[in-house]
Amino acid sequence: MISVLVVEDSRVEQEVLLHILRSDPDLRIVATASDGVEAVEMVARHRPDVVTMDLVMPRMSGIEATRRIMETTPVPVVVVSGNWGCEDVARASEAFAAGALAGVRKPRGPDASDYDELRGHLLRTLHQMAGVKVVRRWRRKHPEGNGNGAAKTALVDRPREGLKVVAVGVSTGGPPALEAMLSRLPASFPLPILIVQHIAEGFVDGLTEWLRRSTRLGVQLAENGRIARGGQVYLAPDGVHMGLDAAGRIVLERSAPEHSQRPSASYLFRSVAAACGGRAIGALLTGMGRDGAQELRALRDRGAITVAQNAESCVVFGMPGEAIRLEAARHVLPPEGIGDLLCALTGVQRVVERGEAV
């Protein structure tokens, strides 16, 4: 039996969530909270297996509540929000950086056309996240880094000639990791970056806009048949795999999910290996499961540069941990270090602070 704390300030929306959770015999509601202050108190009192967290609440926001929970009584936190526009993504990403594991769209009610789909996704996410082991996070004393250890940068003697593309797979905890990595890259970064992010349906549009505002690169949803250009970031759209062909064109298709994911990092890495061989960079960041790990090893075997996010900076060390176990990663670094590595490999100056390059 999985114990759940529901944090939601709207009485109507709280009742919808309670109705959904009560429909699952494996879930047990231990308490409810209507603001962040109550949420912190209830977590300490009940020690639930998982928390559903609203973001905008009186007295204390869901972001600050998540931060305090992870500093005092760490438990898995799932952000549940009704909207996933740019500002909502920004708030959710702050919660992820504070330690929240995942974000889902809030079901509106049984009469809504997407109720069954959103209900199922919420319940599956709670089951999955309840099993994740979380650790205490200490409040940051310095603005740079993510509080999970010093940023390490791999040394590269000289730029690698002939590189064609950067392929990235990422899942749980991805948005702040992507921002930390991409924010190190200047607008002159010469390679296209293709990203598969496992994320709740509807979230990717807001994530695209948020990354566009927080990095110097062009960020867009990928389009089938478009030539992948340097200095541009392409995010896989909802529900389709993304790859690359030998002519450098983006390929989108709806073939079967891989590792229960579509888009899948495995599909992306396999496609890039076929199209570019050793002239690619593959990166596997924070996330649950094994998606992309074996295919990252295949990229390495073809001579590509491969990197995995280190355990200390991951929200969930599943995907990169599996890649490291398979010896798929030539480098193991935090997101900032991965960004610095990309700059070193391409011979461009890394950005160390907003508006300042070295």
Image (cartoon, rainbow, N blue to C red):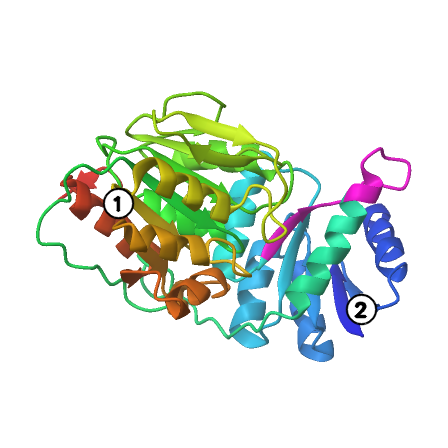
Name the residue furthest left.
157
> Considering only vertical position in the picture, is 339 above or below 147?
above
Describe residue 308's horizontal placement relative to residue 84 as left or right.
Answer: left
Quadrant where the C terminus is found in the figure: top left
User: Gap between marks 1 and 2, in whole Å?
Assistant: 53 Å
**Picture coordinates of residue 271 (x, y %)?**
42, 39
> Considering only vertical position in the picture, is 131 above or below 249?
below
Which residue shows up at 34% across the image and 66% down it? 327
Q: Nearer the viewer, residue 185 or 41?
A: 185
Q: Earlier in the sequence, mark 1 or mark 2?
A: 2
Q: Secondary structure at mark 2?
A: strand
Residue 97 visible = yes
**Picture coordinates of residue 303 (x, y %)?**
25, 51
Type of residue at label 2? Ala
Mark 1, residues whose alpha carbon is within 10 Å: few (<14), some, or many (≥20)?
many
Q: Nearer the viewer, residue 344 or 322?
A: 322
Q: Is there a contact, CB below 8 Å, between mark 1 and mark 2?
A: no
Which residue, given by chain and number where applicable, does mark 2 sit on?
31
Which residue, given by chain and number where applicable, does mark 1 sit on?
278
**Picture coordinates of residue 186 (x, y %)?**
24, 36
**Picture coordinates of residue 285 (x, y %)?**
42, 55
Type of residue at label 1? Gly
In this rendering, the label closer to the viewer, 1 or 2: 1
- Numbered range of the magenta stretch: 102-117
